[in-house]
Amino acid sequence: MNARHITLGDFELTSVSDGLYRLDGGAFFGIIPKTLWSKKVQADENNLVPVGLNSIVVRADEKTILIETGIGNKLSEKMQEIYGQPAKLPENLAVAGVSAEEIDIVINSHLHFDHCGWNTVQQGGKIVPAFPKATYYAPEGEWLHGHMPLERDAISYISENYDPLVESGKMKLLRGDQEIVPGVSVKVFPGHTETMQAIILESRGKTACYISDLIPTTAHLGLSWGMAFDLFPVQTIESKKKYYARAVPEKWLTMFTHDPRVPWGYVEKDKRGKMLLEQGR
Ligand SMILES: [Zn+2]
């Protein structure tokens, strides 16, 4: 199940990583005590845990789509000290045989810096699109929120990742659920932020969902296993319930944005109602 390549109906999905970064384990697991989360994830001497940055390339009919663009390479020195800046996406795209020019569409689930960093790069003192032919999509509510200087989460937004694209008309801001191209749509799941969107892929009766920070890793499957970064933690739980109500019985492939090892898998419910990753499928 850890293969980096999977077929979904007529679509080809490839998981590509921007590398690993580090977050405080306590913040990563919200209200869950360390005695519980440390059974699943090993923290280092500074209580930091490794966090993946998983993007997905979708070959869908005529279009090549990139879901999420990691941290990128534009972090300030201060932020690099805190989080690290792996900057592996370009080489991992190359290894997967995907060129920047091939990408027709880029979709960001939300605009936190660890989800849209490679939207743009610096070139000759200017910020330019990293995927020159792509149309970019992100939630309008995220863009508006990113422009509010809120003490709670202003650090999470770096305007160079999206403002130049919005100004040049390359980024389209979405209001709510909609289809981007046939079989590729977005659906808002509030909780982590108000307008964070999942990306849903459907082909020949098969469905996959990039659920982003609603369920960032396989260690976050439990309803109360949210992150301290969630702005609306009670809504995170409601959104997870809504997601599982469809994804489990309909056997959706769930894609995990921050799992350092497992890019995707099928979630199931055991007899006691506990959410688990289905093994050996
Ligand atoms: Zn994130």
Image (spheres, rainbow, N blue to C red):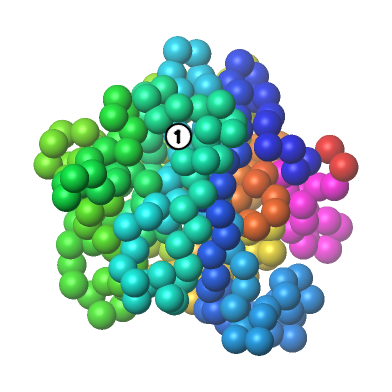
Q: Residue 130 location, x and y as percent?
A: 32, 38
Name the residue nearer the viewer: 266 or 25: 25
Residue at 77% x, 61% y: name it: 273
Q: Residues within 10 Å of mark 1 (few under 14, many from 20)?
A: many
Quarter holding residue 133: top left
Residue at 56% x, 40% y: name it: 92
Residue at 53% x, 73% y: name it: 23
What amino acid is at disc 1? Leu
Q: Residue 37 location, x and y as percent?
A: 71, 77
**Is 135 inside the magenta-drawn segment?**
no
Quarter holding residue 208: top right
Side (left or right) of 148 relative to 56 = left
Furthest residue toward front: 124
**What secondary structure is marked by label 1?**
strand
In the depicted structure, whether residue 255 falls above or below residue 21: above
Residues rendered magenta in the picture: 265-279
Name the residue nearer the viewer: 2 or 275: 2
- Quadrant showing the N terminus: top right
Name the residue nearer the viewer: 1 or 241: 1
Q: Residue 85 location, x and y as percent?
A: 45, 62
Q: Residue 138 location, x and y as percent?
A: 31, 43
**Is 267 inside the magenta-drawn segment?**
yes
- The residue at which mark 1 appears reads as 66
Side (left or right) of 45 relative to 137 = right
Side (left or right) of 76 relative to 57 = left
